[in-house]
Amino acid sequence: RSMVISLIGRPNVGKSSLFNRLMRKAHKAITHDKPGVTRDRHYGIATFEELAGKDAAEAILVDTGGFYPTKIEENVPRKNDQIMNKFFNIMTDQAKTAIRESDLILFVVDSREGVLPFDESIADYIRAQKKPFWVLVNKYDTDKQEGEELEFYQLGIGEEEMFKVSAEHGLGLLDLKQRLQKEI
Ligand code: GDP
Ligand code: MG
């Protein structure tokens, strides 16, 4: 079967931007929003044929909403907060489903913010599920940020599992794609 790869991480770290970057343009059209509560989970077929030549390999890449490591209290006084908290919990449940279905997790973090406690909780969760994961240190837009990636080794990964990328500027993505190609 095709390999399933999921983009996981806190909200706003750049998962969807990376998703769009990793998808070939021609295939973006077949990504879709599922109706209802799963609207924030996108599927797409990523192909790496530009790297693999004729032996085009395929993988299913899954974008997810945000992962909130702790269950958020839904029984709060304000109706709006109740709805938002429910939404956060639904997104996290979806991300957990994606993790369960995945062969490899691309765990996205923000180079500028550094390692947050939430990041550590997410790494712990993925590890507890016994899933292999790579860390994509995103928003690494310029070499002036050299060194920002180092603290992410705290997440318990080796050099081979870390990728400095910038979805916005398209940096580091060729290296990532080549490594993915080898995995698929
Ligand atoms: P998601 O919530 O994890 O899916 O994050 P998004 O892909 O929606 O991106 C969140 C914000 O970060 C948006 O404003 C993006 O434009 C911005 N962003 C994403 N990737 C990068 C990057 O590589 N560099 C910078 N500077 N901003 C980025
Ligand atoms: Mg997103």
Image (cartoon, rainbow, N blue to C red):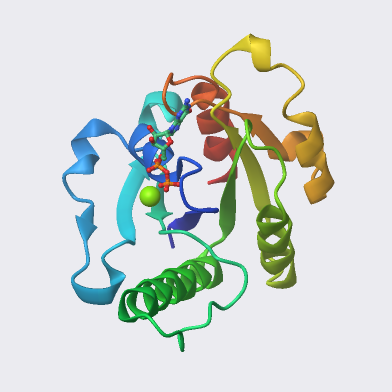
Q: Nearer the viewer, residue 51 or 42?
A: 42
Asked if residue 104 is positioned above or below residue 76 in the image, the reply reads: above
Q: Nearer the viewer, residue 114 or 61?
A: 114
Asked if residue 164 is positioned above or below residue 72 in the image, the reply reads: above
Q: Residue at x 70, y 36 (%)?
A: 162
In the rendered view, does 170 fall on the left or right side of 120?
left
Asked if residue 101 is positioned above or below residue 171 in the image, the reply reads: below
Q: Residue at x 57, y 60 (%)?
A: 103
Question: Residue 9: where, in percent of width, then height?
Answer: 55, 53
Q: Residue at x 22, y 67 (%)?
A: 34
Marks counted in the figure total 0
Question: Residue 173: where, in percent of width, then height?
Answer: 50, 26
- Which residue sits furthest bottom? 75
Question: Does residue 22 appear in this view?
Answer: no
Asked if residue 94 is positioned above or below residue 177 in the image, the reply reads: below
- Which residue sits furthest front? 77
Question: Residue 93: where, in percent of width, then height?
Answer: 47, 76
Q: Residue at x 32, y 49 (%)?
A: 45
Question: Does residue 2 appear in this view?
Answer: yes
In the rendered view, does 60 fall on the left or right side of 30?
right
In the rendered view, does 73 fall on the left or right side of 145?
left
Classify the position of the N terminus by image quarter: bottom left
Q: Quadrant of residue 53?
A: top left
Question: Residue 70: where, in percent of width, then height?
Answer: 62, 73
Q: Nearer the viewer, residue 22 or 3?
A: 22
